[in-house]
Amino acid sequence: MSTSRKPQGGTTRRGFLSAAGGAALAAGAIRPAVSAGPENLPPNVPGWSRYLGSGVDAYPYGQPSSFESHVVRRNVAWLTASVESSVNFTPLHELDGIITPNGLCFERHHAGIAEVDPSDYRLMINGLVDKPMIFTLDDIKRFPRTNKIFFLECAANSGMEWRGAQLNGCQFTHGMVHCVMYTGVPLKLILEEAGLKTNAKWLMVEGADAAGMNRSVPLDKALDDCMVAFKMNGEALRPEQGYPLRLVVPGWEGNMWIKWLRRIEVGDQPWHTREETSKYTDLLENGKSRRFTWAMDCKSVITSPSPQAPLLHKGHNILSGIAWSGRGTVDRVDVTLDGGRNWRPARIDGPSFDKAVHRFYFEFDWQGESLLLQSRAIDSTGYVQPTKDELRAVRGTNSIYHNNGIQTWHVRGNGEVENVEVS
Ligand SMILES: Nc1nc2c(c(=O)[nH]1)N[C@H]1C(S)=C(S)[C@@H](COP(=O)(O)O)O[C@H]1N2
Ligand SMILES: [Mo]
């Protein structure tokens, strides 16, 4: 499935500030949609209460309900020149809590999904080490393990929105992020096993896919919190996510999280590979480029209501969204219903882990007025998520990567939601 490019592509919508109505914030009563009349009482019971269901062996590997079959990763046709070098997006508008189910984690491949046989898998460590080593997967699994929940965001997430509102749905504007629990080995332990030479300063990490994708990682980060992970959410990594082993680089851009990791070379300077020179750099107005923009800045998005999740009821409604920061936890999320005139704190609910997705909620009353919804996250360093205009003032209009600007959704009187920009 795919969406087509929307006709409003590239346009910036202005003038909403004066049009926005102030929303009543007192939560109204929830009026049930179904009455308690006799037509809803026995003997009028549905089929599922009258017949036996399928047995325990019907689904050896469980699947979501068939009524949830629309909850899938989707791509954007005009961003998909070839499926092997492309991206699809997490259906954020259908999810809740902080964990992304394995089958819904967005995928980004440069040369398709490598099909690696774990019995033939090897991880090589070479370069500035005392003992170059080659590990099997079983060797890796004999190191002490750790379990950590982290988000992974592609640096190009929201990149199509730099010049104005474009894609209609948070799945497409913000769906290059997922958050799972990784089980693996601290990279530090593996490097220590090989023994680092005193002049070791950088790593070159390389994938076993046909792209042989590689990046330079500073040694300080590798020794701090990087992991090699073999499980996500308790089960083996999915092939799409790098089975049998991927690098985890907490808080840093997804491109560095090498999948199907096959080699780590230790050196004394960065390699300046394709993925950190012609790609994953940001061209500024003065013709210079930002390089090594590793950390993902604090960001948030309202996932419901959103273009794929319109408002269906007048009265009491739940607004929800996610927030994350590559520099720590998210301390606060503010929400506005009127395009930024009035901000109120949202309620962060669920665990708050370092460099992981946080879930927020905001209950509000809606009587059919036009709304301009925005969320603004503040992380544990005190950094405040900027507006898109604030970002462009510093970075210009040539960027793709690292767009963490505030997203606006326009709710129409009929409950439909569209991607807009206010200034
Ligand atoms: N070997 C290899 N690793 C890779 C890639 C790749 O194409 N090959 N893509 C990178 C990019 S650009 C991103 S954003 C993340 C995506 O991870 P995911 O597919 O688990 O979402 O993997 C990174 N690791
Ligand atoms: Mo990426």
Image (cartoon, helix red, strand yellow):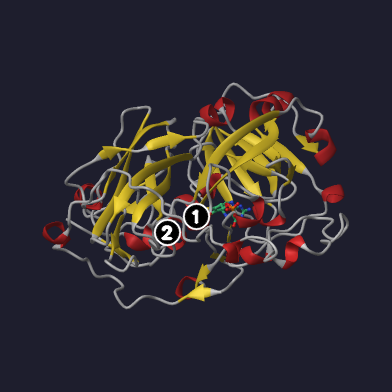
- Left or right: 15 in relation to 250: left
Q: Residue furthest top?
A: 198
Where does residue 237 sit, x and y in percent of width and height? 71, 48
Q: Give the quarter of the image for residue 55.
A: bottom right
Name the kind of residue labelled 2 in the image.
Cys
User: In front: 95, or 238?
Assistant: 95
- Left or right: 422 in relation to 100: left
Q: Dot 2 corresponds to which residue?
A: 170
User: In front: 274, or 67?
Assistant: 67
Name the kind of residue labelled 1 in the image.
Leu
Dot 1 lies on which element? helix
Q: Is residue 274 visible?
A: no
Q: Is residue 288 above or below residue 83?
A: above
Mark 1 and mark 2 in contact (Cβ < 8 Å)? yes
In the image, what residue occupies the spot 47% across and 70% down? 79
Dot 2 lies on which element? helix
- Left or right: 422 in relation to 166: left
Where does residue 161 sit, x and y in percent of width and height? 33, 61
Q: Dot 1 corresponds to which residue?
A: 92
User: In front: 366, or 168?
Assistant: 366
Q: Is residue 77 above or below residue 46?
A: below
In the image, what residue occupies the spot 80% across and 37% down? 135
In the image, what residue occupies the spot 88% across and 57% down? 57
Q: Report how far apart the C-alphas of labels 2 and 1 lie in the structure.
A: 7 Å
